[in-house]
Amino acid sequence: MKKYEIGLIGLSVMGQNLALNIARNHSISVYNRTESKTKDFIKNKVDKQEIKAAYGLEDFISSLAKPRKIMLMIKAGKPVDLVIDSLLPYLSKDDIIIDGGNSHFEDTNRRLKNLEEKGIRYLGVGISGGEYGALHGPSIMPGGTKEAYAEVADILKDAAAKTDKGACVSYLGPKSAGHYVKMIHNGIEYGIMEILAEIYDYLRKVLQLKPDEMGDVFAEWNQELDSYLVEITAKIMKKNDPKTGKKLIDLILDKAKHKGTGKWSVQSALDLGTAIPTINAGVNARLVSSIKQERVENAAQFDKSSRALVDKKEILSQLKSALYFASVIAYAEGFKLLKTASEEYNYNLNYKEIARIWEDGCIIRSGLLEPIQQAFADNMNLNTLITTEQFKDQLNVKANQLTELISTAAQSGVPLTAIHSALDYFNSLKSEELPANLIQAQRDFFGAHTYQRRDEKGTFHTNWE
Ligand SMILES: NC(=O)C1=CN([C@@H]2O[C@H](COP(=O)(O)OP(=O)(O)OC[C@H]3O[C@@H](n4cnc5c(N)ncnc54)[C@H](OP(=O)(O)O)[C@@H]3O)[C@@H](O)[C@H]2O)C=CC1
Ligand SMILES: O=C(CO)[C@H](O)[C@H](O)COP(=O)(O)O
């Protein structure tokens, strides 16, 4: 009986496309809990590729060459544990499980430890690129048992997106390094998506541009930025609803869902004591968007803001600056958190390599990743991207261009939470003097928490009244 090089469980959007991608170079066996999905996949998507459909776990396992390589592309959370438990009775020592979903990094640590005790090797692999990337080449972020990676590296390299620097995949580090990096990738994704949403809001409410015009603006800006998220935003603005012929964006409800990776990035940042305010703003904005009914009721109780009158050409230039500025800050926050996490969890991350594998295939790919790589090539242990030769001057110039934008947005009642957070983060990081002396004094006043002085070493307490 023929033995297949790799097996894949989970034939939803990502699993189907990844299976078709892998099948271009390697034989693959697939399995899905719901049989009808497998049948539909084989009937409608598979042509001449070498893909075996298995309709039972035993059949699936026995179709694989040893040591077995099994990729999970299933819903993150409990399903991953359930599937691993159901596989265990059939697995042998040295088999490799590859979790390609968006699992929480702490779950990955737990699973890796449990499986290692049973002699099973485990890789926590972040995959980005959505439906298109999974089929044509995603960015792949593997972490976990290193020698297991060596055994699947060729399969992952063949599947990954390619740039002139190589395949967009690289072993990132032990344990949950891959899933941690993917989580932060998604955190940056949340930040940039929110920055674009705020610019869209300003364009429609203050400049009163129509979606087609906004599409042109985003497309023109993107000639320089070369960002996938800007590119799809431009395309979204142009799309007509097939049912009504109206602009689809105008018909979509203003409530955004989320599956957890942005929230986990913020939770982890707080746990590690690292600020990521622009990314946090992206998460908060989705939470506020979700209480639509409450917002509608609130709106009826307040006067409508009066739209600021602005010079269109000038403000468009400021909005372009805001997009560049806040996007750089979102990456800077993400990389700073990666550095903190790498030190705390001994991931030994290579930031330049992370920026390289994000250059294509993934959702946050953009022209900014080239200067980010240069910045890490100059200093692999950078504290922050904001002070680097690649960004320092540009951030300085663009920060100065944001004041009119921010004040006219406030006047017009348009929240620019992420853009404002990015500017405040930048201003805080470049402040020699912050007002935390007052915080120290307040804490000591009400709670005798003590304080440190500028003029003497030690800890002090004052009887304030
Ligand atoms: N969609 C995207 O753009 C991206 C998704 N990801 C991640 O990749 C993974 C797959 O994503 P996606 O393709 O969107 O699919 P979903 O996250 O929607 O997961 C659906 C798949 O999970 C399976 N599943 C769910 N519960 C169970 C269970 N208890 N036992 C067995 N199988 C189960 C489903 O099987 P069944 O058909 O039987 O219900 C189906 O194959 C997720 O972790 C996701 O977060 C990563 C990058 C991008
Ligand atoms: O990982 C992804 C992209 O990189 C997935 O599309 C993920 O679902 C996006 O997160 P959310 O659903 O919370 O917006």
Image (cartoon, rainbow, N blue to C red):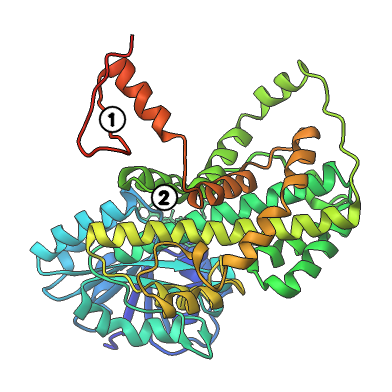
The residue indicated by pointer 1 is: 451
Vertical comparison of 442 with 92: above or below: above
User: Reading the chain from its start, which is encountered first: label 2 or label 1?
Assistant: 2
Vertical comparison of 4 with 230: above or below: below
Spatial CA distance of label 2 from label 1 is 31 Å
Horizontal arrangement in the rendering, residue 213 relative to residue 182 (left or right): right
Q: Nearer the viewer, residue 263 or 302?
A: 302
Vertical comparison of 352 with 107: above or below: below
Quadrant containing the N terminus is bottom left
The residue indicated by pointer 2 is: 265
The percent position of residue 370, horizontal first and vertical second, equals 55, 78
Quadrant containing the C terminus is top left
Residue 120 visible from this viewpoint:
yes
Pointers 2 and 1 in contact (C-beta within 8 Å) = no
Question: Which numbered circle lies on residue 179?
Answer: none
The percent position of residue 19, horizontal first and vertical second, equals 45, 76
Q: Specify the amino acid type for callout 1.
A: Tyr
The image quadrant of residue 227 is bottom right
The percent position of residue 387, horizontal first and vertical second, equals 50, 64
